[in-house]
Image (cartoon, rainbow, N blue to C red):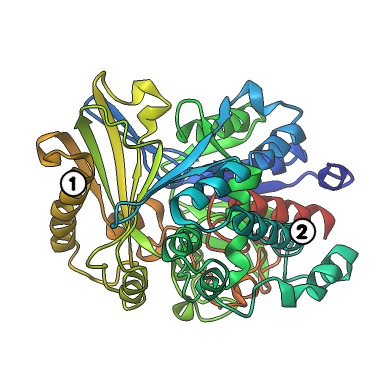
């Protein structure tokens, strides 16, 4: 932990954080811990970014991320503030991470314990348990090598490459899966189509395509099945609430419903923000929103590090929130119904087309949080991956998918599902874009389909404007709660150890 302790020899500064998602809140906490005067501006009426919830009748649904991993990153953040995370957030390790259903009737329970998981795969598919365990060891090697080099530090400061851990990581590049696709690696390793599909799925955790994304993403399997998956008491939104409470305790000034008009820059140096026509002076600004929105709206005439139109956006989603009458033990907290043709599904996504038969994710938080649904009912968060919005007919796609998903889930459960749905809310990519500010509703910002994706992401600081920094899912190191927390840590180190 010593390397993350703040150096207090710096001058107290006025720092603005623009965007109140996970990364923005974490950055504001770090700046407040360092003794700065911190103001956080959020355009919507709640903090959390994608980490919010929805209430329909007597049902509660998490809106965004639904899997909690690497809680030590949150623990580190609270420790910096002299607090214990356990005083703000209770969470439990999941015994069963996900239940997988295949069109041929195969069902695989993905246990958190890697030995049990490997035996489950052997029992259902005849892939030897030793093969799965060796795969997870390879995934652990990639994770342990890449994290200190490619995730936890800026990739855009030469000095970071002079550390021994970075040099060691660079020397290991030939063994990190950068030069082959995730699918090719998994197919060669396992052979069995069902097991390949299960491990290919981990590419979708950051909105990527396993047929294009590098095998480096194997490390996600390690995180889930060896580092562990968790569930926070009260739902995923409890993470947002814990961070918000800490923000206020540390004296961060939080302004919700405040849209920033533009950044004020003089002679290449940031001077402040303009909000509602009024100029507010700040010494530094940390932008924690979508990077495309930043260049389109907040700094007119500025030039990004590269043409953002060439960025490959991550996938988006159509999400159905269904309040369902009945209790269905066939489903667990996290469930996946795989498509029959995964390659065809991703071919469609690459072409900007909603797949004809997509893989379906069903998240039932009432499994862990009874108050999320009335007695005798369940709350289903049902999501399918789609391309980012480029003008598709989302009303037609929603209608088609509603019927298909009800039929597929009803067949799995052996009942006419449409007769059990008592309430519904639907979210489409344009609505995700409007609610979160993400371009095209791309949930994870940019895809990681290029082998050099980590290096091509926008850096965590501006090369043209002094005093301007960036964190969040659309910049280095990427989307998802852990990477957003890493991005806030990187900005902290850039500001205080530059």
Residue pointed to by mark 1: 411
Question: Horizontal and vertical percent for residue 60?
Answer: 32, 30
Residue found at x 29% / y 33%: 379
Q: Quadrant of residue 493?
A: bottom right
Q: The N terminus is located in which quarter?
A: top right
Looking at the picture, does residue 269 appear above or below residue 221? below
Q: Quadrant of residue 102?
A: bottom left
Question: Horizontal and vertical percent for residue 61?
Answer: 34, 35
Residue pointed to by mark 2: 148
Q: Is residue 142 visible?
A: yes
Of residues 27 and 389, the one nearer the viewer is 389
Of residues 392 and 95, the one nearer the viewer is 95
Q: The C terminus is located in which quarter?
A: bottom right
Q: Is residue 360 left or right of residue 199?
A: left
Residue furthest to the top: 375
Looking at the picture, does residue 388 appear above or below residue 435? below
Query: Residue 495 — which label?
Result: none
Q: Is residue 23 left or right of residue 211?
A: right
Of residues 391 and 448, the one nearer the viewer is 448
Residue found at x 17% / y 35%: 423
For label 1, the crowd category at 10 Å Cα-Cα, with few meaning under 14, some 14 to 19 and many 20 or more, is: few
Of residues 379 and 293, the one nearer the viewer is 379
Question: Horizontal and vertical percent for residue 136?
Answer: 64, 56
| SS for dot 1 | helix
**Mark-to-mark CA distance, 2 and 1:** 46 Å
């Amino acid at each position: 932990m010593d390397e993350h302790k703040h150096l207090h020899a710096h001058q107290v500064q006025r720092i603005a954080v623009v965007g109140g998602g996970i990364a923005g809140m974490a950055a504001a906490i770090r700046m407040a811990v360092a003794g700065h005067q911190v103001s956080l501006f959020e355009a919507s009426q709640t903090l959390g970014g994608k980490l919010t919830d929805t209430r329909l009748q007597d049902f509660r649904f998490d809106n965004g991320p639904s899997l909690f991993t690497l809680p030590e990153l949150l623990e580190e953040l609270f420790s910096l503030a002299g607090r214990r995370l356990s005083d703000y957030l209770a969470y439990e390790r999941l015994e069963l991470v996900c239940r997988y259903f295949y069109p041929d009737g195969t069902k695989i329970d993905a246990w958190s314990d890697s030995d049990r998981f490997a035996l489950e795969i052997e029992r259902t598919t005849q892939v030897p348990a030793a093969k799965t365990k060796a795969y997870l060891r390879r995934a652990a090697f990639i994770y342990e090598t890449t994290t200190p080099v490619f995730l936890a530090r800026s990739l855009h400061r030469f000095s970071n490459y002079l550390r021994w851990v970075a040099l060691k990581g660079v020397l290991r590049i030939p063994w990190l899966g950068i030069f082959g696709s995730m699918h090719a690696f998994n197919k060669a390793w396992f052979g069995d189509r069902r097991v390949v599909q299960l491990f290919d799925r981990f590419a979708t955790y950051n909105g990527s395509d396993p047929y294009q994304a590098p095998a480096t993403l194997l490390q996600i399997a390690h995180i889930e099945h060896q580092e562990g998956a968790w569930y926070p008491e009260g739902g995923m939104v409890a993470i947002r609430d814990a961070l918000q409470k800490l923000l206020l305790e540390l004296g961060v000034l939080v302004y919700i419903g405040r849209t920033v008009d533009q950044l004020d820059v003089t002679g290449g140096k940031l001077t402040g923000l303009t909000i509602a026509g009024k100029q507010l002076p700040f010494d530094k600004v940390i932008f924690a929103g979508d990077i495309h929105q930043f260049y389109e709206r907040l700094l007119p005439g500025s030039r990004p590090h590269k043409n953002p139109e060439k960025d490959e956006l991550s996938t988006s989603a159509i999400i159905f929130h269904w309040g369902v009458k009945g209790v269905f033990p066939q489903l667990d907290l996290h469930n996946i119904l795989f498509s029959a043709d995964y390659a065809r599904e991703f071919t469609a996504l690459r072409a900007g087309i909603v797949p004809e038969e997509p893989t379906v994710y069903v998240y039932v938080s009432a499994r862990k949080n009874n108050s999320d649904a009335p007695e005798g009912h369940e709350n289903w968060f049902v999501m399918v991956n789609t391309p980012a919005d480029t003008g598709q007919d989302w009303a037609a796609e929603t209608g088609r998918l509603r019927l298909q998903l009800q039929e597929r889930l009803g067949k799995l459960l052996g009942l006419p599902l449409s007769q059990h749905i008592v309430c519904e809310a639907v979210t489409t990519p344009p609505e995700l874009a409007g609610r979160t500010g993400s371009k095209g509703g791309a949930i994870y910002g940019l895809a990681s389909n290029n082998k050099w994706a980590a290096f091509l992401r926008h850096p965590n600081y501006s090369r043209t404007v002094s005093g301007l920094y960036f964190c969040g899912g659309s910049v280095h190191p990427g989307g998802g709660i852990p990477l957003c927390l890493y991005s806030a840590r990187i900005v902290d180190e850039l500001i205080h150890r530059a």
